[in-house]
Image (spheres, grey):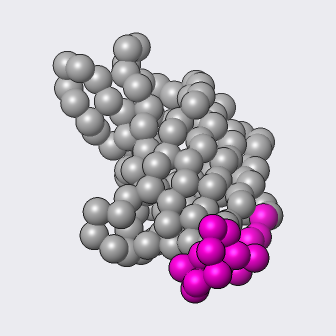
Amino acid sequence: VYLGGTGAANKLDDYEEGTFTPTYIGSTTSGNHTYTTQAGFYEKIGSLVNFRFRLTINTKGTIAGNIIVGGLPFTTSSTSSSYGNAFVSNAGNLAITAGTNVTAILDLGADTMNLKVWSVAEGTASITDANLTNTSQIFVTGNYSV
């Protein structure tokens, strides 16, 4: 399909949609945690990937270190400063300070993102295993280039 012209730059030749299985990974110890909900969905249009997922822990297990979400459907672009967008629309049952915001940053050239907390008083810090509980839950939506 050509959009807005017939040149190579106007050719849309890649569309895909599907599901993926997001996972929590600890930067020190990956962990043996279990999930109540582990659901991800995506659409890939050309080099743009739109995604959304929900993760709910059932048992925290031995996860340790900074918390990373892995298993995104495609590897992100590794081009410098081409970070995608990730929006945490809901986060529940995290052991964090009231008034902080949960955010995420996609890693370049990987299928992972790092979870962060942000507050006016302290700035940005990584979410760690100490912030997870047996019922921690996040909903994330975003997009990135491959």
**Residue 44 located left or right of residue 109:** right
Chief secondary structure of the magenta portion: loop
Can the viewer see residue 98? yes
* Residue at 63% across, 68% down: 4
Q: Is residue 139 above or below residue 74?
A: above
In depth, the one of 112 and 29 nearer the eye is 112
The magenta span reads 1-17
* Residue at 71% across, 60% down: 43
- Can residue 7 be found in the magenta stretch? yes
Residue farthest toward the bottom in the current orientation of the protein? 8
Can the viewer see residue 32? no
Q: Quadrant of the N terminus?
A: bottom right
In depth, the one of 23 and 2 nearer the eye is 2
In depth, the one of 14 and 60 nearer the eye is 14
Residue farthest toward the top in the current orientation of the protein? 98
Q: In this view, does 7 lie above or below 27?
A: below
In depth, the one of 110 and 137 nearer the eye is 110
* Residue at 55% across, 54% down: 143
* Residue at 70% across, 80% down: 13
Q: Percent position (x, y) of residue 123?
A: 22, 30
Q: Percent position (x, y) of residue 103?
A: 42, 37
Q: Is residue 1 above or below residue 27?
A: below
